Image: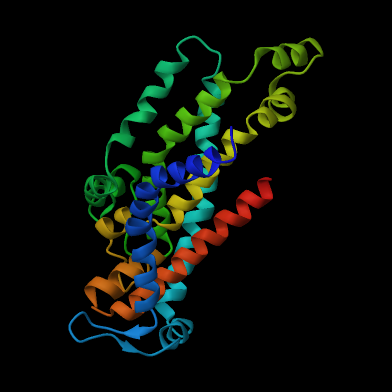
Amino acid sequence: MTGRAAPLLGRFRAGYVAPSVLLVAGLLYAPFVWTAYLSLTRYDGLIPPEWVGFENFVKLLDDSALLTAIRNTLIWVAGTMVLPVGLGLLVAVLSYDIRGGAWFRVPFMLPYALSGAGLGLVWSPILSHDGIANKLLGVDTAFLQEAPHNTIAMLLVWTWQQLGVNTLLFAVGLQSIPKEPIEAARLDGASGWRLFRHVIWPLMAPLTAVVVGLALVASLKSFDIVWVMTQGGPGRNSETLAVTMYRDTFVASEYGYGSAVAVMLTVVTGLASYLYLRGRK
């Protein structure tokens, strides 16, 4: 390629990707910049935003509802790592390399067809005080009324939905593993837990990083199930950070304060993802 043609090719490439870059900037980055600006203002959606600096972020430090939301969000994160991800791996391993294993995974996939809102509508009457769950278990428990039981109950519902997709992803990972290392390990006497721990699990590391990363981000943003089942109540004791952001912004019309919560949630999600990916590397 001549020296004169190289700049022309570079300009062509820049012009080719420019529309996509502008679209991404308009749909993703511009709203975040606007939200970051609103977080530094006092704004109710009617009068023009009033600049207050970091007042909203200082207010966050004294908000007891925010501390409750942080606690519940951490429960969601820890529970997601143990239940949907851990059980998904278990089901995938148990159904791996057996006859009819694919059919064994089908029932776990069906709940994933429901949306989070639909899931909440299905399970809310089941877990209510006079619902079928209390009658079947023979107990008198307010599953959705007391903290942290309500968060744990919603986490179990979330597990019921997410288990199937995690199982499917791990099953795909297991099927993509080369047969030779496994057969060689079996010839050396490895089986059961030793085979999985020292051969299969390391070979699945790249896919595991993807599954855990997706589950981590999803748990940090948990909103729809919580809002439909409890609306963060009673008394805001089951709110997550995403629910707190929604309530403060669109229910209380405190757009500046809600934007501050949104910025904090974005930073926490980005930081958690970065630390996780860095640790995996």
Please tell me which residue is depicted at 43% across the width and 63% down the height of the picture: 148
Farthest left residue in view: 46
Q: Position of residue 147 (x, y in %)?
A: 41, 65
Q: Is residue 170 left or right of residue 107?
A: right
Residue 271 spot, x, y in % from top left = 56, 61
Q: Quadrant of residue 38?
A: bottom left
Q: Quadrant of residue 230?
A: bottom left
In the rendered view, would you say 265 is above or below 258? above
Q: Residue at the spot x=22%, y=73% of the render?
A: 251
Determine if residue 239 is in view: no
228 relative position to 29: left or right: left
Where residue 281 sits in the image (x, y, percent)?
69, 45
- Residue 130, position in %: x, y? 22, 54
Decide which of 118, 5 is in the foreground and name it.
5
Residue at 48% across, 83% down: 61
Which residue is painted at 40% across and 58% down in the image?
151
